[in-house]
Amino acid sequence: MSRVNQSTEEALRKMAGSLADPITVDGVTDVNGLIPLPILASGTVARITRWAETSFDDHLEVFWFQGGAETSIFEDDYPTGIVPSEIEVPITPARMAIDGTAFLYYIVTAFGMQDPSPRKQLIIDHTQAPEEMLEEADFLNLTLWGYYNCFTVPPLTSGVDIAIAPQPLALEGDQFSLHFQGYRSLNGSPGEGDVDVVPEAVETFTKRLTDDEIKKGFIQHLPFAPCIKALINNDSLTAIYTIARGGRIFGRSRAALAKIDRIIAGHEKPCYSP
């Protein structure tokens, strides 16, 4: 049974400004929280990062708020003070069966005090059309073997440029989002249990497309930090972009891949290290 009795929008609003980290949901990258159609069918996982200060009687409860009703979907105690670095909460297709807007959040009770997280908005829409597959982005100035290395021109410390092709399906004002993620693998694979994902090598750029960008394409610049700086050798970087209209993603690109090699034989440190 829930340890809190807050089941109204007004009560949820009072939780703004919480110190608890925001909750994340796998596969939901849209800034408005639109859940892609494949995830509505397959389910997903919400992730909660361990809170900074733990006690010896911590309690976690996760809530789903939709249609004026609040439901507790996960609850656990941590009586020894040992809290996992990340807690996974399954979100089943049945949980996302009703179209509309839902809010996901959690409450941590530690040192006898409750600390609520910010609300994560989720938009559920089973009527959305399947996403179109868009042409992948193009990492510029790669070697013939697909690498960025210590001899890349311009130098990696200047960042890299990514070319986005013309988008015939887009309209002026559509939302464009370009997401980068780094890996400790050469093929952009996260590995089993996401062991090869580099958490600090992540960046997302979002903008509204102009008519000129739609017709001619454009260049997006990626600075050296944080993505490239965190990748050293036998690593890789992927780029995936989406285009949305009215909060709905209707196009998603294939993943573009760049391999990273910042090692020079005989040198102790990777190039571009402090």
Image (cartoon, helix red, strand yellow):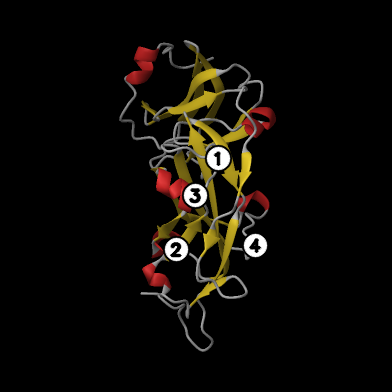
Above or below 140: residue 204 = above
Q: Secondary structure at mark 1?
A: loop
Work out whether mark 3 precedes mark 4 in sequence or the reverse, and give the earlier one: 3
Q: Nearer the viewer, mark 3 or mark 1?
A: 1
Q: Earlier in the sequence, mark 4 or mark 1?
A: 1
- Pointer 3 or 2: first along the chain: 2
Residue on which the image places disc 4: 187
Q: Mark 3 or mark 1: name the one nearer the start of the chain.
A: 1
Indicate the quadrant containing the C terminus: top left, top right, bottom left or bottom right. Answer: bottom left
Q: Earlier in the sequence, mark 4 or mark 2?
A: 2
State which mark lies toward you, 3 or 4: 3
Q: Residue 179: which disc?
A: 3
Look at the numbered disc 4 and give the secondary structure of its residue: loop
Residue at disc 3, secondary structure: strand
- Say which amino acid is labelled 2: Asp
Q: Would you name the residue on which mark 2 appears?
A: 161
* Total number of numbered discs in the rendering: 4
What kind of element bears circle 2? strand
CB contact under 8 Å: marks 4 and 2: no
Of residue 62 and residue 76, the one placed in the foreground of this image is: 62
Q: Of the residues tagged 4 and 2, which is closer to the observer?
A: 2
User: In the image, what residue type sits under mark 1?
Assistant: Leu
Q: Quadrant of the N terminus?
A: top right
At 44% from the left and 77% from the top, the residue drawn is 153
Closer to the camera: disc 3 or disc 2?
2
Q: Position of residue 149 (x, y in %)?
A: 51, 76
Residue 205, horizontal then vertical, whole percent: 42, 48
Task: Report, in whole angstroms, how far the alpha carbon at label 4 lies from the one at label 2.
Answer: 20 Å
The mark lying in front, picked from 2 and 1, is: 1
**Whether residue 27 can be seen here:** no
Residue kind at label 3, given as amino acid type: His
